[in-house]
Image: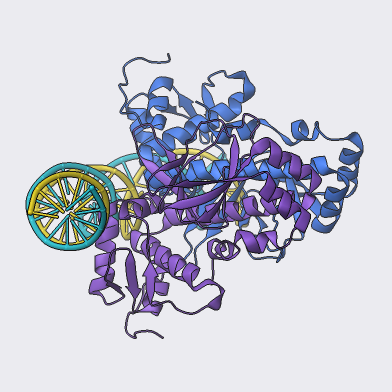
Chain colours: A purple, B blue, C yellow, D cyan
Amino acid sequence: MPTATEQKSISTLSQRLGALDDKVVSRLNEISHSVSSLAGRSIIIEGDPAISVFSLQHGIASVFKLLPDGRRQITGFLYPGDFLGVTFNMDAEYGYGAEAVTHCTLRAWPRPALEHLFDEAPGLRRLFLAKIADELTEAQDRMLMLGHRSIEERVAAFLLTMARRQAGATGIRIEIVDIPMRWADIADYLGTTAETVSRTLSAFRDRGIVRTGKRGEIGILNWPALEAHAAGVKAQEGEINR
Amino acid sequence: MPTATEQKSISTLSQRLGALDDKVVSRLNEISHSVSSLAGRSIIIEGDPAISVFSLQHGIASVFKLLPDGRRQITGFLYPGDFLGVTFNMDAEYGYGAEAVTHCTLRAWPRPALEHLFDEAPGLRRLFLAKIADELTEAQDRMLMLGHRSIEERVAAFLLTMARRQAGATGIRIEIVDIPMRWADIADYLGTTAETVSRTLSAFRDRGIVRTGKRGEIGILNWPALEAHAAGVKAQEGEINR
DNA sequence: CGGGACGTTGACGCCCGTCAAGACATGTGG
DNA sequence: CCACATGTCTTGACGGGCGTCAACGTCCCG
């Protein structure tokens, strides 16, 4: 049962743009410029005037909201092809912050020029609309996670999402999953703490569900158990891999 | 500091439609029909084919996602002027369930007819786009709530949202706030349980922050304390009302 | 090689979920 | 109008999940 989150992740920018007129694509390239950001550096700051819309080319970024006391909720991780800084507010301020998880390269469009292009190319506007709609269903899924699922369920679901994303459309069960973000980022994404993320992964390891190796990598040994956890079922963890 | 949630709630359907062409409005009325739903009854069911788009006329409805074991996350409460069942998926299935909290009357449009009207009236499409964008920022705010705020903060913020909604654009501090939903609904909205909602309100009452009276009504006695709680500040609860 | 960032593990405690009983309101049939 | 059933809210008791604080281990990069 793939979630909306994963379905979204499959479509990259190039795939999406494939549906557009060639002329529009070339115009898009004309009015954009390229920027890059080192891991850990801020890309956009909540409340700043929204002068640009970005498309992530390479790397992974996080989008987050902050509380005055420093608590942080990562509302999503962005992958190549995802858009950043799309806002439809009249006041035109970014409604959230974003920073690079890994080294990122991005394509930046000045908002006025992009909006002008919207009027010329209805397909482009529709593309952004579909993107926003995807994000909304994803956000609703995440609310369910944060509100009513145990930490083990959240971590299991997160691992599966990462694994499926790397599998792409192949459907193959990846053995070694890359986890480029820090535990603290995962924690802020799942609504918990870095310690609890670590403890949960250790528990999975002790139960033979995952294998921990190099930094930034996790091996999945028992898919059914992980999927059962993610689904919220009290799992029987007998068999390994199918 | 009003949140995106409240800003959204201010604009009702009629206000929004005011920006549209008269001809479009009359066409909208032509192709719609009216339906109503008793309190507690289901309006749309997750996974059903999305044959209609609704606009809430009177009453309050809840939108939710379900887990197989029955756990429920209410992703939002809807008020007159809000839309329901807007989906941009190709598969055209409702991505969530909805039910009436109070007795509701709704206006229903067949999706094909509405989408046809979209092509005629770009302003209408933009209106729905703005609506979706509002919902997205609202959803992101809610993720912050669910992930990183204590129960007291969530309940305080909920009460303030309800109070401000009833105040409308006046900015007046309402004394008695109507809370038409059941505690269990509030709990599923805030990611907690009905017992904890009750306990939290009792704690607020014991500290002189709110006053409990008739069913479905709560009096707010100490605004600063409530606002401090909602902001996540460890409050000094000395003064009453300003 | 040394320092800093990150991850792991332990100890502790409290918030809050769960179970249960009782209070109260509302509706229904007699 | 009353007896009863039903749904909802309140309050208590209890326990566990997980947040917090702290110390240690590990990796990376200068």
Q: Position of residue B135 (x, y in %)?
A: 61, 43
Residue B52 location (% of width, % of height):
77, 56
Pick the front one: B188 or A216: A216
**Residue at figure coordinates x 70%, y 56% from the top left:** B88
Up-down relation of residue A79 to residue B215 (above or below)? below
Q: Nearer the viewer, residue B226 or A36?
A: A36
The number of numbered badges drawn on the structure is 0
Q: Is residue A106 left or right of residue B150?
A: right
Q: Note whether A145 is above or below A167 in the view shown.
A: above
Q: Is residue A43 left or right of residue A29?
A: left
Q: Position of residue B60 (x, y in %)?
A: 64, 42
Q: Is residue B10 visible?
A: yes
The picture places residue A82, in percent across and down from the top left corner, at 57, 54
Q: Quadrant of residue A67?
A: top left
Write the residue at 58% across / 19% down.
B171
- Quarter holding the C terminus of chain A? bottom left
